[in-house]
Image (cartoon, rainbow, N blue to C red):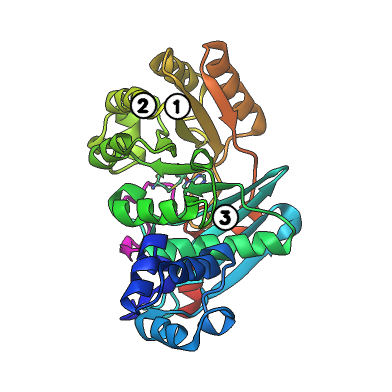
Amino acid sequence: MSAKRRITDLSLAEFCEFAAAQHQRPFRGQQLFDWVMGRGVCSVSGMSNVAKPLREALEAHFDCSPPRVQWSGDAASGTEKAFVQLSDAAGDGVEAVLIMEGERTTACLSSQAGCPVACVFCASGVLGLRRNLTRGEIVDQFLAVRERAQSHGRRVSNIVVMGMGEPMLNYSAVIEALDIIHDPKGGGIGARHITISTVGLEKGVARLTAEGKQYTLAFSLHAPNDELRRELVPFAAAMSIDAMVQAAAAYLDGTGREVTFEYVLLDEVNASSDDAHELARRLRGVRGTVNLIPYNENPGFNWKRPSPEQVDHFAEILRAAGVKVSVRKRKGHRILAACGQLRLQELHRTH
Ligand code: SAH
């Protein structure tokens, strides 16, 4: 990390404090926040209504360079992927994805560089964890995706923290970044349009529940029982399926928001009719939605995506049992949009 804090790391309150410390009136802080979060301008030369001494002070205190981003993919396919360079690591960065689907424009953000969880089918964990991202590095991803969406005449409507990393292991930075992204004077994304996805870590989930925010909580379930789940998700023991179901009820109680259960469908692993029936029995009566995600195949991994018929059949069994289901459309497979794939490719290229 560069020694200076990213300018995108600051909340509105912190910009106002900074302005005060520079003997400026508080509205100057609001102006700065508006340049960065309202208009996506990080470099002080673009801040036309800010007096020179304040611009110079900003530059002296903060890293005001624009996020360094390389884009890949093709807007016509609906998905484009950003590789956002980290300032401290040559060749290394994190991924953010722009997904355009009908009315919906989603930014998928990473919470960590690499990931310590290492789910067996996921590319993000292959090299382990490099480090936690700062608040500003998460906001940078949002700004990059928003700008790209704008260039296609679209506005980001949804945020999912489903990129690289486990958000509950970088809790404060993730929540503070989302608060800036949500702030009506900042990113302006409605809390209910923001989803945090986790493998399930008791402490973080309890903390999020206690905060009472309106963010959507998504559990990465991936199996109908703890035994299979432990084979797929190395951190599964941290929270049993029973504990997740209880936490889902507590989240609904505390926030009024139903949780989502993500279930990556892997052929011949967790996608059979028996698995669907077992999952249906397990989730019967639980308030929430199962989001079925047909596996995005990764080069170097042998896991397979089930056929569309199998996916439909799995969904039907759940529906017939009264479980709410959504099926993720096939997006981004051509540009390696599954978590971590692009970073692996990039690291192979540069190292
Ligand atoms: N660590 C968090 C958030 C990041 S992963 C979590 O596990 O929830 C976001 C989701 O993408 C998870 O459900 C993860 O299992 C899933 N995922 C990872 N690799 C995938 C792939 N190749 N195809 C489909 N989904 C994948």
Q: Is 51 located above or below residue 162 in the figure? A: below
Viewer-proximal residue among 35 and 127: 35
**Looking at the figure, which quarter contains the N terminus?**
bottom left
**Upstream in sequence: badge 3 or badge 1:** 1
The residue tagged with tag 2: helix, strand or loop? helix
Residue at 35 percent of width and 81 percent of height: 61
Viewer-proximal residue among 32 and 311: 32
According to the image, label 1 marks what residue?
Answer: 258
Asked if one can make out residue 342 in the rendered structure from this viewpoint, the answer is no
Q: CA distance from mark 3 to mark 1?
A: 27 Å
- Mark 2, Cα crowd under 10 Å, few <14 / some 14-19 / many 20+, is many
Q: Magenta residues? A: 117-133
Q: Main secondary structure of the magenta part?
A: loop
Q: Is 312 located above or below residue 344 in the figure? A: above
Quadrant of residue 128 within the rendered picture: bottom left
**Image x and y of residue 202, in percent:** 25, 37
**Upstream in sequence: badge 1 or badge 2:** 2
